[in-house]
Image: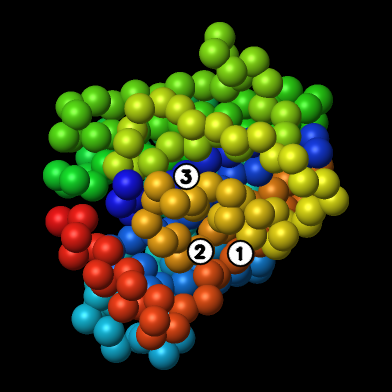
Amino acid sequence: MYTSRIVGFGKYQELPFVCFILASKSMPYRELRINTLKNRINVFPRKGYEDHPTNKDPEVDSYSCIRAGMMPSNQGAYLIAFNGHMTKRVEANLKEGMPPFTALDLTLLDFRGAHDDARIASLMVAHSDNNHQGYLGVNDIDREEKRILKYPNERIHTLDDRIIFIFDKDTNFEHQKIISASDLNAETLAEYLHKNIIDKEIFFGLGTGIALWNGSSFNFGAYNHPVDEVIVNQWQLKYQRSK
């Protein structure tokens, strides 16, 4: 399967997190960078490839794919992952006091995407009583569907030690993987998820970002897959065959 983005959320050793995986059409030429001062992870042109033709659109190639912050009036922490610059709209809605479902729903209404480019989002709201809620949302004009699901729900009763995620090329809800490794921090969790979600059924994944809430602060991790000319050539060949 050729996919451009993957977003998800979950809990790891009681700690809620969101995840963003970059696997795009210009993927050899991008990377994820952490900005701890602004509680974000950004997509940027990969160093050495700034002048590549695929890195000319700031709305596409330089954006925050993950944002995190605090809800107003002590309503908890939020962690957002979106396959595009719409993280800032969800964040603005939450800071205005909108309920999480509404904040996500209005953003998906405004940003419908294009053909062969579904909009997908994950949102985790963490509360002090550990009653955390996760959301997956999609607006796919090819399938003519827009929907949001809240977790836990009737199908998935727990978020513990797992990631629940969605592909932009397969918007059927939902996929999940158990996290079996122990004693991972945000950086090593990002690498673990990347290597366990990107498998032989999915074309090469470029990088994975994680935002994790530890109850008092946010931790961020980013894993960027090494890239060399051999990998670039392999990717270009696979991409041409996928068209």
- Is residue 143 shown to the viewer in this render? yes
Query: Circle 3 is placed at which residue position?
Result: 7
Mark number, residue 222: 1
Q: Residue furthest top?
A: 154
State if disc 2 and disc 1 touch (CB < 8 Å).
yes
In what element is the residue under mark 2? strand
Q: CA distance from mark 2 to mark 3?
A: 12 Å
State if disc 3 and disc 2 touch (CB < 8 Å).
no
Give amino acid for label 2: Gly
Q: CA distance from mark 1 to mark 2?
A: 7 Å
Q: First in sequence, mark 2 or 3: give its number.
A: 3
Give coordinates of residue 90: x percent, y percent: 44, 42
Left or right of 50? Residue 200 is right
Q: Residue at x 66, y 35 (%)?
A: 178
Looking at the picture, does residue 117 appear above or below residue 96? below
Q: Bin the neighbour count of mark 1 within 10 Å (Cα to Cα): few under 14, some 14-19, many 20 and up.
A: many
Give coordinates of residue 238: x percent, y percent: 27, 63
Mark number, residue 207: 2
Looking at the picture, does residue 75 appear above or below residue 195? above
Q: Residue at x 47, y 44 (%)?
A: 7
Give coordinates of residue 158: x percent, y percent: 68, 21
Mark number, residue 133: none
Q: Quadrant of the C terminus?
A: bottom left
